[in-house]
Image: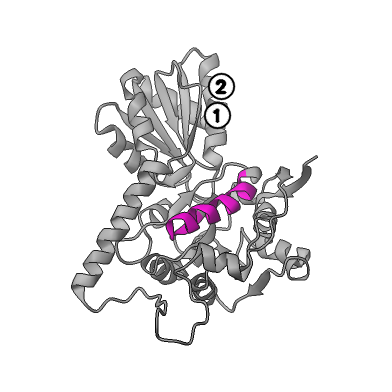
Amino acid sequence: MAEKILMKGNEAIAHGAIRCGADGYFGYPITPQSEVMETLMEEKPWETTGMVVLQAESETSSINMVYGGATTGKKVMTSSSSLGISLMAEGLSYLAGAELPCVVVNVMRGGPGLGTIQPGQADYFQAVKGGGHGDYKMIVLAPASAQDMYDFVGLGFDLAFKYRIPAMILSDGVIGQMMEKVELGEMKPRRTAEEIREQCPWALTGKTSDRNRNIITSLALDPNVQERTNIRLQEKYKAIQENEVRYTTYMVEDAEYLFVAYGSMSRICEAAVDQAREAGYKVGLLRPVTLFPYPEKQICDLVPQLKGILTVEMSAGQMVEDVRLAVNGKVPVEFFGRNGGIVPSPDEVYEAFVKLFNK
């Protein structure tokens, strides 16, 4: 029988890392995600699985430690919150340019600047559009529960290694701090050195001979080489868009109006859908699980039955741009959001819907 434990979403990240066979975690404390490292320190996986857990001296150091571990084909990860991820932006671009798999967790807080330690969703552009320099993307998973936080660590590593790309779990302070029952999966052993060599022929393995030596870098002094690299990366991103879209829906079969929300806002919008249905409005919800790749086709497919779409975020409006691109003006798209760490209630979402679509 599966083990179920009441825990915070951040704690679930730590347990997911241990149980999926992660080799290393390098991080730095920042609210509201500090429980990730705290739980790993309490669990002491170095004594049971051999997993390395290290508090770096800064977020910049932690992402560069991830880079080093990733070059050897190891399952390595880090976590932070918003401004800490900004400090990792250069390293994330390096990882993407060198085509190295890893998992990065961002438990978002309100900003900009130091902002607030309360939850936010204003890092969407940073995660989905590539917050660092250059034409790069990451796979971005948006959990909506503590169970998702646990499950997405393993999923993130699977996708990262499948495509040799960084994967980000884009959570928020609500999901990170809320407590729910989490069903823990089986303990997967860490891969052996031989398994890593078989699964990651590109990885550095300590060879001293120049013959057949692997070189991992994101540097290309020849512009023609860099262009070929960029073209290859764009082909990879296209394959991810075609094959890895994930989303959930709620009461969309007969919906005339659609809420689009991710993370904690999708849960609030689900309650708002129920409220709207009770009032006689045919409203449904689409929750993107992958923010990249984005479920634009799935949203577009619903357009013929819709009179309008309401995008709900804890931001000034970021994901709403992708919703508008997906529907291409074929149906009105409105936005409702709160800022500064304020979490809207289902009542507020419902009232915004009525005001915007019943003028």
- Of the 4 image quadrants, the one containing the N terminus is top right
Could you tell whether 85 is left or right of 358 in the image?
A: right
Q: Position of residue 221 (x, y in %)?
A: 24, 79
The reply to whether callout 1 and callout 2 are in contact (CB within 8 Å) is yes
Percent across and percent down for residue 266 are 52, 36
Task: Quickly name the residue at label 1.
Answer: 270
Q: In front: 62, or 87?
A: 62
The kind of residue tagged 2 is: Asp
> In the image, residue 273 lies at what x, y percent?
52, 24
User: How far apart, in angstroms, are the residues tagged by discs 1 and 2?
Assistant: 7 Å
Q: Is residue 242 left or right of residue 180?
A: left
Can see residue 110?
no
Let me know if residue 37 is in the magenta part. Answer: no
Residue drawn at (51%, 76%) of the image? 68
Q: Is residue 341 visible?
A: yes
Give SS at disc 1.
helix
Mark 2 — residue?
274
Q: In the rendered structure, which segment of residues is drawn in magenta?
A: 148-168
**Residue at 35% across, 18% down:** 305
Residue 117: name its quadrant.
Answer: bottom right
Q: Which residue is pictured at 53% across the width and 60% down the height? A: 103
